Image (tube, grey):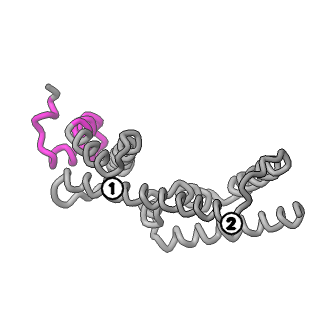
Amino acid sequence: MTPFATYTDEELVTLLLHSDEGAFTEIYNRYWQPLFYIAGKKTQDPYEAEGLVQEVFLDLWRRREQLQIRGLLRHYLAVALKYRFINWQAKRNRASTYAQYANRHLPHSDDSPELWLSFEELRGRLEALVAELPDKCRLAYRLREEGFSQREIAEQMMVSENTVATHLARARKSLRAGLGDFFILFF
């Protein structure tokens, strides 16, 4: 039995605020399985459920020094999992919507080497343009690309949502301009 096993959740959170790894491990050991069970029921996929729960704990550790948990820790973790699930579901819905659109509107099978090379060239150009973005714009763009909401990006970057919106707008404008030149040259 670890010495942290006798601590209350409030004591563990206080220790976590001071980056105590033992307290984090105890929180993880207490709540991983219940959160995994909930996520598994929601996703119907153990791999996805495990990923969602890991993201909750990873975020808990990353934001440990800024945590402001009001109420019970288990409720805080359950709500964090709920929002992760909502974002996961939204991402799946976007992918499904795109796949349906692509099936209806895009040519079905043109596996020509020219098309593949064109796509690779476009992807390379996009990566180069993203790399040229200012640091904060690039970070906001990458987080958005990973499916994070504007609010989550603001929390991770520790800035306001308006600042995130500005960074994203600048990134989109810069990428549009850079890719616009690429398309003119390409076609």
Tell me which segment is drawn in magenta. 3-29
Residue at the spot of label 1:
66
User: Residue 64: x and y, percent?
Assistant: 32, 49
Residues at discs 1 and 2 in contact (Cβ within 8 Å): no
The residues bearing labels 1 and 2 have C-alpha atoms spaced at a distance of 47 Å
Where is 127 relative to 8, above or below? below
Q: Residue at x 26, y 48 (%)?
A: 38
Residue 26 part of the magenta-drawn span = yes
Q: Residue at x 73, y 56 (%)?
A: 126
Residue at the spot of label 2:
105
Please state which of residues 177 and 102 is positioned toward the viewer in this rendering.
Answer: 102
Please state which of residues 3 and 32 is positioned toward the viewer in this rendering.
Answer: 32
Q: Residue at x 22, y 47 (%)?
A: 13
Residue 99 part of the magenta-drawn span = no
Kind of residue at disc 1 = Gln
Q: Residue 7 vs residue 113: left or right?
A: left
The image quadrant of residue 88 is bottom left
> How many residues crowd mark 2 within 10 Å: few (<14), some (14–19), many (20+)?
few
